[in-house]
């Protein structure tokens, strides 16, 4: 009989490091860091053996090496990450056609239509873990519940390499003692704000009036997290979704904005976003930037153009104006910690229609002389990159920014279009 816990969240364990251990058996059981090195760079991901020493993704390599002197640094096999991630999704699709992939290494499944074939959700979860291990060679954790939010929490509790099923009627017993940081959307900053007011568990969050949570975290975030704490999540598992937006972001540490650094970051982000748009045959009219200031205050600015665009220079110019608008409205001397660029209001654009020269040239119009030239340059670079690799050519500011930070291959695996 169907238990009702028919939404599953399947999440590969320490995916990037696990792939490296799969590719090189000598790494199995050893602390592994993908990216970085003992003298510099950034750790992109860490194995569970490395995490036991406190090594985490985003950590400087030198610090990781100090925490774990036996740490093995590897460069990363980005093509293998994509291939093996796709192989896992194929295993999930053999169980049910209702699979919603939300990143390179995790997905939701609705198995309500598969229980008559494979048994209750607990049996299906166990079967998925066995098949992924046997066919792909990777460990995967699975959570099952009546809602997506609870299934995701269950998979986190199941890690590493486990299975947790939250049967209907047992939700509060399961949720209440868990740390509030497991709620989807509660990051370290919000977790600390809640802890400062004595709210450390999901049960304590659920027992706090929504109005009080909203005063602590803000109206929208507080209301959403209160609903999650009560397991109020009506979202269903969706299979095919057309991208509603394409975006990218870059953490900056802590710095005061200046023209050169802001332009370099935005050029790099615009290059990544526009390449993904063109690859999908899309363009967008609405360009949005997000600027996060010290203290985690984020400000967004948007501009909607008359026609959809997908060229790097145009996105860079519009984003730059929007960012400086946000910075100019902030208190003097404010430092920024993150910049993000996204494009929405999307439409198909496999080619552009040239316009008659009846008005002064407008470079942001894709059919103008300048707009068409920009698209032609981007197209040429796309073909060169397709043949010789993503680093073969690029705009100067974007190339210099890319070489100074996290590899684009890793960023693109981590980002997914919403």
Image (cartoon, grey):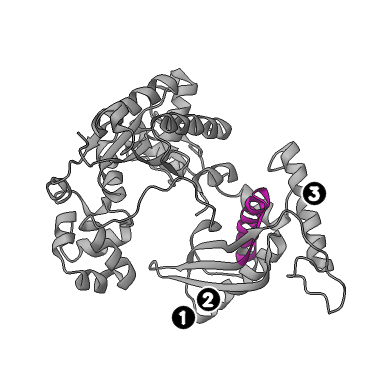
Residue where numbered disc 3 is placed: 380
**Residue at horizontal 60 percent and vertical 50 percent from the top:** 404
| Residue 97 x/y as whole percent | 43, 37
- Taking 270 as reference, is 280 above or below it? above
Disc 3 or disc 2, which is closer to the eye?
Answer: 3
Q: Secondary structure at mark 3?
A: helix
| Region rendered in magenta | 262-285
Mark with earlier residue (3, 2): 2
Q: Which disc number belongs to residue 326?
A: 2
| Residue 184 x/y as whole percent | 31, 53
Residue where numbered disc 1 is placed: 331
Indicate left or right for 17 with 224 as reference: right
Image-quadrant location for residue 392? top right
Mark with earlier residue (1, 2): 2
| Residue 335 x/y as whole percent | 48, 70
- Taking 5 as reference, is 243 above or below it? below
Disc 3 or disc 1, which is closer to the eye?
Answer: 3
């Amino acid at each position: 009989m169907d238990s009702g816990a028919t939404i599953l969240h399947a999440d590969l364990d320490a995916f990037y490091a696990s792939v490296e251990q799969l590719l090189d058996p000598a790494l199995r059981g050893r602390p592994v860091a993908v990216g970085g090195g003992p003298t510099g760079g950034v750790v992109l991901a860490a194995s569970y053996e490395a995490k036991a020493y406190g090594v985490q993704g985003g950590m400087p390599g030198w610090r990781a090496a100090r925490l774990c002197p036996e740490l093995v640094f590897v460069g990363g096999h980005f093509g293998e990450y994509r291939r093996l991630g796709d192989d896992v999704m194929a295993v999930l699709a053999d169980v049910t056609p209702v699979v919603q992939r939300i990143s390179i290494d995790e997905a939701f499944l609705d198995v309500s239509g598969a229980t008559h074939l494979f048994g209750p959700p607990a049996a299906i979860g166990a079967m998925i873990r066995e098949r992924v291990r046997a066919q792909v060679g990777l460990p995967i954790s699975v959570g099952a519940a009546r809602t997506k939010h609870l299934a995701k929490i269950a998979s986190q509790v199941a890690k590493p390499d486990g299975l947790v099923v939250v049967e209907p009627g047992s939700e509060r017993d399961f949720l209440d003692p868990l740390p509030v940081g497991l709620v989807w959307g509660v990051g370290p900053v919000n977790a600390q704000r809640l802890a400062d007011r004595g709210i450390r568990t999901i049960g304590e969050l659920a027992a706090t009036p929504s109005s009080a949570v909203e005063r602590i975290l803000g109206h929208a975030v507080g209301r959403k997290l209160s609903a999650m704490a009560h397991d109020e999540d009506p979202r269903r598992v969706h299979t095919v979704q057309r991208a509603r937006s394409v975006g990218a972001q870059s953490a900056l540490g802590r710095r005061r904005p200046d023209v050169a650094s802001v332009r370099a970051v935005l050029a790099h982000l615009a290059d990544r976003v526009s390449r993904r748009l063109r690859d999908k045959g899309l363009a967008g009219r609405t360009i949005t930037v997000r600027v996060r200031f010290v203290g985690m205050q984020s400000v967004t600015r948007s501009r909607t153009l008359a026609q959809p665009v997908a060229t790097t220079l145009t996105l860079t110019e519009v984003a730059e104006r929007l960012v400086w608008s946000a910075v100019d409205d902030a208190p003097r001397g404010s430092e920024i910690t993150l910049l993000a660029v996204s494009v929405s209001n999307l439409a198909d654009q496999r080619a552009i229609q040239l316009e008659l020269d009846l008005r002064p040239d407008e470079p942001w119009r894709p059919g103008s002389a300048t707009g068409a030239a920009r698209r032609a340059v981007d197209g040429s670079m796309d073909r060169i990159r397709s043949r010789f690799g993503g680093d073969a050519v690029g705009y100067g500011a974007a190339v210099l920014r890319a070489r100074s930070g996290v590899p684009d291959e890793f960023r693109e695996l981590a980002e997914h279009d919403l």
